[in-house]
């Protein structure tokens, strides 16, 4: 989900190309069923904004080591006070929405099924090391659990939703129940728990599991949730709805009395996905567009990253005022942004971006379930590039960023300026804890990762870029990959030099690729120019201009210094005029002339400065 920098970094759309050919590698839709299972029963009280709930959890030790304890996430506990890790790191705000108090997750009972009778685990819970933060729950077991062994846990709990903030909560009678139940942390293959507090910039990480959810809401209300609706009935003034979905790592529901619905079928070969779009009254025009983008995105992403494998996909358009929940992804369900992003005739490609981004998350973190705290670039960064790639195919490069009164800036150029200008940020390959400011996090994780990938697409071809990322998405589906797995897919497509010389320096070390060109020296009918490349070794195109015309030369990546001694009077030299090397923080250094003329970034920089107030004011 985009954070504070979303407004700036997600305006950029991408360049005009045709959809890549579908990969020949089959998508593993026949992956084995998840070995974990949650059966959740919930009753929403809209007057108190509380969820009274029970959970039956079947959990299998899938690691190679015995375990003697369990770790749960209790994300809603981040809103218990202003002293939690989340509050301290976020400054009590997220994406411009300030915390207004409230929220929590009380575990009222926790038992372990045993042949001799239920074993009470609640009394075994130990106080957390950080007394101000209870977003992690450590539960010692009465006996060691061997690899392959399965246990059943039963939990009774009370979830208290805050006024909508940080992806969850309520706004009037609109309720988003996200991160609302005690969820087991992921046990890694070596037997270590991937547990962490709820960080200010971080998101989530969990095992794939089967989820069955039954929700009671008041009569006259409607509810949508993760997975497929399989049953609906009325009981004593309540509507009861049951949802089921296998192979997902989260479960959410959204409820309100006024939900309006649009539905459409998306077909890809023999697979049919039912798309459900729900929205507030009066939002029909915007909802139509959100549905169009979703269907186009399913085509585009499915061809590159493998077909969407679930039978249902739900898109929620939140009402105005619910900005704290807008723009957030969950498996089989995502929340887009409201109608303030749909202005007919608006000459800036804003209105499709949030929907495209959250849909892309159905692949990058939904199906390829990386650790979003340890490696957020594998989630938000890959999604950001995929978003731009989709919108580029829909709008074309010229209209993909800004198109106002004849001023046109393509989307990835806008991303480059926002990501690389200004103070140095930690590299995208860092964990969320390396970032102290939300703007730095957004510039690095979203903007910089997307700029690196787009540089590859423009330099070595968009189809190759799509094949590499598509191979990663398909082979890692229903898995929990790391950066090395991403690099392996790129090396398979390009060669081992790609991760060694380009991706690792750019993503893990934060390297740039800058160029210094000396002014041309014309002497005795010959022109001499010295070009020096620093940082990531990207090949460039060099353009020489003079009174008799122009000449283009290739500058291979193997040479950091290129000294030209050319016949003729070439009075200016330009590097990368086709804007392939976006990883350059300031391309004004790439133009030199015997008599200085235009600077390529001059107009762009002035336009960006004028647009900053608009960019900061629009959207979530």
Image (spheres, grey):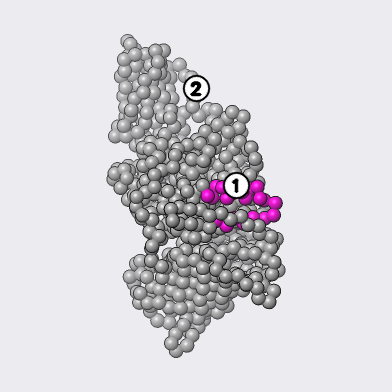
Residue shown at 66%/50% (left/top)? 284
Q: Residue at x 64, y 59 (%)?
A: 164
Find residue 213 and report its image quarter.
Answer: bottom right
Name the spot of residue 394 as percent of width and height, x first: 51, 41
Q: Position of residue 266 (x, y in %)?
A: 51, 53
Find the residue positioned furthest to the bottom.
116
Q: Earlier in the sequence, mark 1 or mark 2?
A: 1
Query: In the image shown, does 94 or 210 lie closer to the viewer?
Result: 210
Residue 439 x %, y %: 54, 47
Q: Closer to the camera, 390 or 193?
A: 390
SS for callout 1: helix
**Can you tell which quarter of the image residue 610 is in?**
top right
In depth, the one of 227 and 330 nearer the eye is: 227
Residue 565: percent from the left, percent from the top?
Answer: 30, 19
Per the rendering, the mark at residue 319 is: none
Q: Are marks 1 and 2 in contact (CB under 8 Å)?
A: no
Depicted 453 relative to depicted 77: above or below:
above
- Asked if 556 appears above or below 487 in the picture, the reply is above
Q: Which of the labelled discs sits on residue 289, or is there none?
A: 1
Q: Mark 1 against mark 2, which lies toward the viewer?
A: 1
Query: How busy is the neighbourhood of tag 1: few (under 14 within 10 Å), some, or many (20 plus)?
Result: some
What is the CA distance from the residue labelled 1 to the residue labelled 2?
41 Å
Left or right, residue 472 beside residue 244: left
Q: Is residue 291 visible?
A: yes
Helix, strand or loop at label 2? It is loop
Residue drawn where x is 33% and y is 29% of the image:
555
Q: Residue at x 64, y 37 (%)?
A: 345
Q: Which residues are magenta?
A: 275-295
Would you say residue 292 sits in the magenta stretch? Answer: yes
Q: Crowdedness of circle 2 by 10 Å Cα count: few (<14), some, many (20+)?
A: few
Question: Does 493 appear above or below 247?
Answer: above
Disc on res. 598: 2
């Amino acid at each position: 989900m985009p954070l504070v920098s979303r407004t700036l970094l997600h305006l950029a759309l991408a360049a005009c190309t045709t959809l890549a050919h579908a990969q020949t590698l089959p998508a593993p839709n026949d992956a084995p069923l998840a070995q974990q299972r949650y059966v959740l029963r919930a009753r929403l009280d809209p007057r108190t904004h509380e969820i009274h709930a029970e959970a039956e959890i079947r959990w299998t030790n899938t690691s190679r080591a015995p375990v003697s304890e369990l770790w749960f996430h209790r994300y809603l506990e981040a809103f218990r006070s202003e002293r939690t890790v989340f509050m301290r790191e976020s400054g009590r705000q997220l994406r411009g929405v300030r915390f207004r108090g409230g929220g929590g997750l009380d575990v009222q009972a926790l038992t372990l099924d045993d042949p001799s009778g239920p074993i009470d685990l609640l009394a075994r819970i130990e106080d957390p090391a950080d007394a101000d933060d209870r977003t992690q729950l450590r539960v010692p077991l009465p006996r060691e659990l061997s690899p392959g062994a399965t246990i059943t846990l039963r939990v009774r709990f009370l979830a208290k939703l805050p006024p909508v903030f940080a992806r969850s909560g309520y706004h009037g009678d609109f309720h988003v129940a996200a991160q609302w139940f005690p969820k087991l942390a992921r046990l890694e293959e070596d037997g270590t728990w991937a547990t962490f507090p709820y960080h200010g910039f971080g998101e989530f990480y969990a095992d794939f599991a089967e989820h069955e959810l039954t929700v009671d809401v008041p009569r006259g209300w409607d509810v949508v949730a993760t997975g497929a609706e399989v049953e609906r009935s009325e009981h004593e003034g309540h509507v009861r709805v049951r949802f089921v979905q296998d192979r997902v790592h989260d479960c959410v529901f959204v409820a309100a009395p006024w939900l309006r619905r649009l539905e459409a079928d998306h077909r890809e070969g023999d697979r049919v996905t039912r798309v459900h779009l729900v929205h507030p009254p009066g939002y029909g025009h915007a909802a139509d567009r959100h549905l169009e983008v979703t269907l186009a995105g399913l085509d585009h992403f499915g061809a590159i990253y493998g077909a969407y494998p679930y039978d249902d996909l739900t898109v929620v358009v939140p009402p105005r005022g619910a900005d704290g929940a807008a723009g957030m992804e969950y498996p089989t369900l995502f929340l887009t942004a409201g109608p303030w992003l749909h202005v007919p005739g608006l000459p800036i490609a804003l209105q499709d971006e949030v929907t495209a981004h959250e849909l892309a998350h159905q692949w990058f973190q939904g199906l390829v379930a990386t650790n979003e705290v340890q490696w957020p670039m594998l989630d938000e960064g890959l999604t950001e590039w995929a978003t731009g790639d989709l919108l580029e195919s829909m709008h074309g490069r010229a209209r993909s960023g800004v198109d106002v009164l004849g001023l046109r800036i393509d989307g990835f150029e806008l991303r480059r300026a926002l990501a690389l200008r200004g103070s140095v940020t930690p590299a995208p390959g860092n964990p969320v804890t390396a970032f102290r400011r939300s703007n730095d996090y957004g510039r690095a994780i979203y903007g910089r990762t997307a700029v690196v990938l787009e540089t590859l697409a423009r330099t070595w071809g968009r189809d190759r870029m799509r094949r590499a990322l598509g191979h990663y998405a398909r082979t890692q589906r229903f898995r929990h990959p790391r950066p090395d797995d991403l690099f392996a897919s790129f090396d398979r497509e390009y060669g081992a030099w790609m991760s060694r010389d380009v991706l690792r320096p750019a993503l893990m070390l934060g390297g740039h690729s800058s160029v210094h060109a000396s002014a041309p020296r014309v002497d005795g009918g010959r022109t001499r120019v010295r070009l020096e490349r620093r940082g990531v070794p990207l090949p460039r195109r060099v353009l020489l201009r003079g009174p008799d015309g122009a000449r283009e030369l290739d500058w291979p990546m193997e040479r950091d210094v290129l000294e030209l001694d050319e016949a003729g009077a070439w009075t200016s030299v330009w590097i990368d005029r086709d804007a392939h090397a976006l990883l350059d923080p300031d391309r004004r250094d790439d133009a030199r002339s015997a008599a200085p003329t235009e600077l390529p970034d001059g107009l762009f920089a002035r336009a960006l400065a004028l647009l900053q107030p608009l960019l900061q004011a629009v959207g979530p």
